[in-house]
Image (spheres, helix red, strand yellow):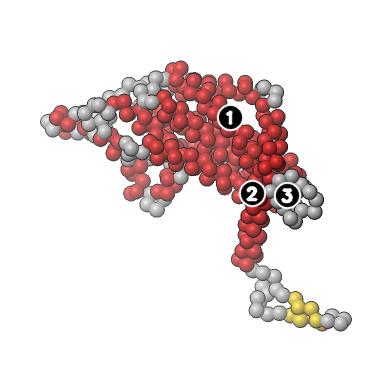
């Protein structure tokens, strides 16, 4: 093993007619800092040029960022919607909704009333705080997993199918910002249509006792996050294993971090210091939104509100749940954007 060079030493080598200073190579942390600094300067320069429609460093005249965005949207539209075969995939989402609809029913029996609990025997004390029949937690958890997984499977194709094409165009000067924005923009109609067809299939066999608009928002936002996570998987996983990663990724968020299997009231004691993982889990907020929407119909029942505290939910959290799910979709898209700039840089030069 060679001894690493001392950063404070400089060796002077005498040439034919001048002295040449040979400085030691930068250390790992210094090199990482230099690369990170250069990366963020490049991102900022591209973003600034996109907003100002200028790039003084280019040797030839090229379109501004907004025109590139328009052309990328047009190209993506031709790729996705031109042949019409994409419409056949919508019926797969109908079938997925039908499968989820047969899981349970809206029949709900809340906790025993307070006056009954005052004289109830010891064996029925648990029924004073927990519902006697509550299928909503299980239905919400499974539906969140199904929609999230379906969105991931759709999302991995957005960037994954033409990764090599993007590298080639990027090496010829294609900026990432308009390309990325165009891809997400053209996916938005598919997200809405997938959610509509899934909602159609789900409501064909499942009667929601809550607000149908909130139920559709729950489905749409799960697709929004699922697509965004699919983008992330498509730029980090090898092509042959992306579908398997979608299964593992969706199961991780649903089974472990949804609050439906490990209740939110238990994580502070059992997983101290890791509760932040539940905060960034889309299924944790999605299941709560589904549960609150369905149980809201039964709030006239005496003592039914007490069930919220059993699962760690807040009855006023419905707008917050939807807002956080929307923000998590942007979060995964931002991570994907960063990785598309950071990874495979030798292929984009």
Task: Please say whether residue 76 is visible from this viewpoint.
Answer: yes
Q: Nearer the viewer, mark 2 or mark 3?
A: 2
Position of 259 with respect to 168 (left or right) is left
- Mark 3, secondary structure of its residue: loop
Query: In which quadrant of the rendered image does the N terminus lie?
Result: bottom right
- Mark 1, secondary structure of its residue: helix
Q: Of all residues shown, which one is farthest toward the top?
A: 204
Q: What is the x, y in percent for residue 268? A: 34, 48
Q: What residue lies at 46% left-to-right and 30% top-to-bottom?
A: 217
Mark positioned earlier in the residue sequence (3 or 1): 1
Mark positioned earlier in the residue sequence (2 or 1): 2
Q: What is the x, y in percent for residue 69? A: 67, 40
Task: Please say whether residue 149 is visible from this viewpoint.
Answer: no
Reading the image, the residue beneath label 1 is: 189
Distance from disc 2 to disc 1, alpha carbons, whole Å, reads 25 Å
27 vs 286: above or below: below
Q: Nearer the viewer, mark 3 or mark 1?
A: 1
Q: Looking at the rendered structure, which numbered label has been put on residue 51?
A: 2
Mark 3 closeness class: few <14, some 14–19, many ≥20 residues within 10 Å:
some
Q: Looking at the rendered structure, which numbered label has been put on residue 343?
A: none
Mark 2 closeness class: few <14, some 14–19, many ≥20 residues within 10 Å:
few
Q: Nearer the viewer, mark 2 or mark 1?
A: 2
The image quadrant that residue 299 belongs to is top left
Distance from disc 3 to disc 1, alpha carbons, whole Å, reads 30 Å
Q: What residue lies at 43% left-to-right and 27% top-to-bottom?
A: 213
- Marks 2 and 3 close (CB-CB < 8 Å): no
Q: What is the x, y in percent for residue 303? A: 22, 31
238 vs 100: above or below: below
Reading the image, the residue beneath label 3 is: 348
Q: What residue lies at 32% left-to-right and 36% top-to-bottom?
A: 315
Position of 325 with respect to 39 (left or right) is left
Nearer the observer, 27 or 293: 293
């Amino acid at each position: 093993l060679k001894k690493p060079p001392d950063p404070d030493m400089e060796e002077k080598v005498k040439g034919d007619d001048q002295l040449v200073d040979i400085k030691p190579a930068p250390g790992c942390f210094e090199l990482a800092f230099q690369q990170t600094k250069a990366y963020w300067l490049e991102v900022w320069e591209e973003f600034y040029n996109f907003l100002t429609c200028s790039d003084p460093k280019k040797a030839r005249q090229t379109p501004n960022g907004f025109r590139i965005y328009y052309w990328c949207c047009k190209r993506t539209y031709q790729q996705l919607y031109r042949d019409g075969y994409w419409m056949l995939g919508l019926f797969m989402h109908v079938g997925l909704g039908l499968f989820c609809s047969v899981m349970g029913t809206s029949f709900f029996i809340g906790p025993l009333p307070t006056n009954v609990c005052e004289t109830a025997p010891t064996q029925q004390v648990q029924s004073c705080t927990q519902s006697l029949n509550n299928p909503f937690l299980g239905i919400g958890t499974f539906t969140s997993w199904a929609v999230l997984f379906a969105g991931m499977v759709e999302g991995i194709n957005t960037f994954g199918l033409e990764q090599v094409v993007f590298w080639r165009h990027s090496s010829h000067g294609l900026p990432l910002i308009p390309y990325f924005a165009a891809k997400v923009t053209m996916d938005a109609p598919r997200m809405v249509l997938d959610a509509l067809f899934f909602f159609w299939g789900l409501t064909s066999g499942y009667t929601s006792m809550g607000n149908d608009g909130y139920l559709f928002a729950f489905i749409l936002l799960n697709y929004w996050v699922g697509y965004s996570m699919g983008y992330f998987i498509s730029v980090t996983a090898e092509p042959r294993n992306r579908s398997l990663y979608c299964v593992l990724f969706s199961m991780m968020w649903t089974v472990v971090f949804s609050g439906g299997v490990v209740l939110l009231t238990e994580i502070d004691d059992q997983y101290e210091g890791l509760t932040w993982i539940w905060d960034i889990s889309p299924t944790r907020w999605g299941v709560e939104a589904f549960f609150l929407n369905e149980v809201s119909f039964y709030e006239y029942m005496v003592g039914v509100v007490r069930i919220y505290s059993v699962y760690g939910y807040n009855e006023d959290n419905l707008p917050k749940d939807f807002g956080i799910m929307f923000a998590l979709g942007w979060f995964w898209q931002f991570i994907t954007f960063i990785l598309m700039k950071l990874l495979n840089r030798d292929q984009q030069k």
